[in-house]
Amino acid sequence: MGAIKKILLNKDLPDRELHNSRMFVDLSENIHIHFREIRMMFGVEEFFEFFEILKEGARDIKKYLRRNPDYQEQQVFDGILVGGGAKRQIIPLKNSPKPHESKYYPNRLQVELQEESVIDAIHIHYRDYRFVMNIETFREFSNGMKAALDNLDEFLRQYDYKEGAHPFRTTVTTEEWNLGKITLLHKIKYKIKRILGRTETN
């Protein structure tokens, strides 16, 4: 979910290739989850935390669907529930080096042309994610990103864009996380105050 200010690009890409119908998990130098064109990279403890959160979320969604058999996708666009409870949205990960960083390659951006024997010619590494595509799709993707950047620059020349207040942006600093000064209770109280329009810190 989000709140779109302006669509910078909307275009159709070439069809996915058959091998991008797969999902699997492998253990190699670390743990990889492959889902269509995306590969996510995890340390072992990160993976088990990820798995437990998904399991908890799946359990709650199944329970909701049993109680609400008339639910239909694409009919409701506001969050009905959060798997694991609403508090899950403001609980930082515990089994990573830092809550907002992955164990492997947290800051990497790298684009690679693979050997001819590799099924996906282009690999794009963005932090701990990898996106794969053939050359034709990469051209469309790259041209699209350039067009979106041009549209963004044009938009920002005409409009004043300022980030709004958000609990994680205005009340939680890296130092506070590290010192443990910000608790779950603090974040819940702040979120309630934001909803009520009162942001005093006492």
Image (cartoon, rainbow, N blue to C red):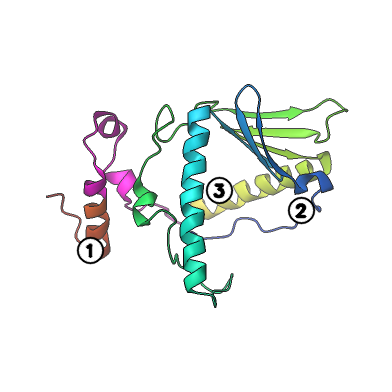
For residue 77, say whether it is visible.
no
Q: Residues within 10 Å of mark 1 (few under 14, many from 20)?
A: few
Residue 46 on image: x %, y %: 49, 32
Q: Of helix, strand and loop, which one carries label 1?
A: loop
What residue does disc 3 label?
153
Between 6 and 97, the residue placed more toward the observer is: 97
Residue 166 falls within the magenta-colored stretch: yes
**Residue located at (50% from left, 51% from top):** 156
Q: Earlier in the sequence, mark 3 or mark 1?
A: 3
**Residue located at (25% from left, 33% from top):** 176
Q: CA distance from mark 3 to mark 2?
A: 23 Å
Q: Earlier in the sequence, mark 3 or mark 2?
A: 2
**At label 2, which amino acid type do we have?**
Leu
Q: Of helix, strand and loop, which one carries label 2?
A: loop
What residue does disc 1 label?
197
What residue does disc 2 label?
13
Q: Find out whether the residues at labels 3 and 1 contact each other: C-beta distance under 8 Å.
A: no
**At label 1, which amino acid type do we have?**
Gly
Residue range in magenta is 159-187
From the viewer's perspective, is the residue at label 3 or at label 1 nearer? 1
Q: Of helix, strand and loop, which one carries label 3?
A: helix
Q: Residue reaching furthest bottom?
A: 70
Residue 57 on image: x %, y %: 48, 53
Residue 187 on image: x %, y %: 26, 49
Q: Is residue 14 left or right of residue 172?
A: right
Q: Find out whether the residues at labels 3 and 2 contact each other: C-beta distance under 8 Å.
A: no
Q: Residues within 10 Å of mark 2 (few under 14, many from 20)?
A: few
Between 53 and 86, the residue placed more toward the observer is: 53
